[in-house]
Image (cartoon, rainbow, N blue to C red):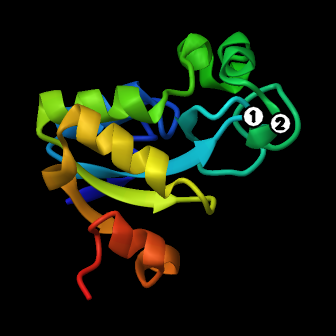
Amino acid sequence: MIVHRGAWALAPENTLEAYAAAMDYGADGCEIDIRRTADGVLVMLHDDGLDRMTDALGPVNQYTYAEFLANGFRSVYGSWAQTRIPTLAAVLELARQRAMLLHLDVKEPGLKGDIAKLLDAADVWDHVVAINALDARSPASRALGLVKE
C-alpha cells in the first residue's frame, strides 16, 4: 500500500514525520510531491502556494529553502507547528533507511536532472515504483528510467 502524502492524519502531510508514521503503521511506501524553491532545492509540498500549510503567502518557487526553514506549519497543527518542509534528499535518505517505496509526483517541469542526481546519490532507484500520470508519458520520465519505451 502506497500512502498519499504520508500519514497526514498523524503529522503534517509530506513531512518526514508523516512518511515515518505511514511506515510505522504498515505502509509499503509513500506518494511524494516534489517542487523546487527559488534557490533550487527540491522540497516536498503538494500545493504550489504556501498559504494552506504555513503562515507564508505565495508560490513555493518565490522562497529560498532558508526562508522555508524560517516558516513553520500553521498553528492549527499544534505540536507539529515546529516541523519543517523536508528536502527530497532527506526523504530519499528516509526511504533508504526504511525500505520505503516511492511514488513520485513531480509538480513542476524541469526537475528531472536534479531528481535523477539525488536518486543516484541516495542509491534508491529501486524504491521508485510510480510517477504521476501527467508526466508518465513525457521524455523526462523516460530519461529518469521510470517508463520503458
User: In the displayed image of the protein, which residue is found farthest to the bottom?
Assistant: 149
> Which amino acid does the dot numbered 1 rest on?
Ala
Residue underneath mark 1: 38
Looking at the image, is 105 positioned above or below residue 18? below
Disc count in the image? 2
Residue underneath mark 2: 62
Of mark 2 and mark 1, the one earlier in the sequence is 1
Looking at the image, is 87 positioned above or below residue 8? above
Which residue occupies 83% across, 27% down?
Answer: 56
Looking at the image, is 39 positioned above or below residue 100? above
Q: Is residue 117 left or right of residue 65?
A: left
Mark 2 neighbour class, 10 Å CA radius: few under 14, some 14 to 19, many 20 or more: some
**Image coords of residue 34 (percent x, y):** 52, 48
Which part of the image, by quadrant, shows the N terminus?
Answer: bottom left
Residue 127 appears in the picture as rendered: yes
Q: Is residue 8 left or right of residue 72?
A: left
Which residue occupies 26% across, 58% down?
Answer: 2
Mark 1: which secondary structure? loop
Q: Is residue 103 left or right of residue 79?
A: left
**Image coords of residue 17 (percent x, y):** 38, 25
Looking at the image, is 96 positioned above or below residue 130? above
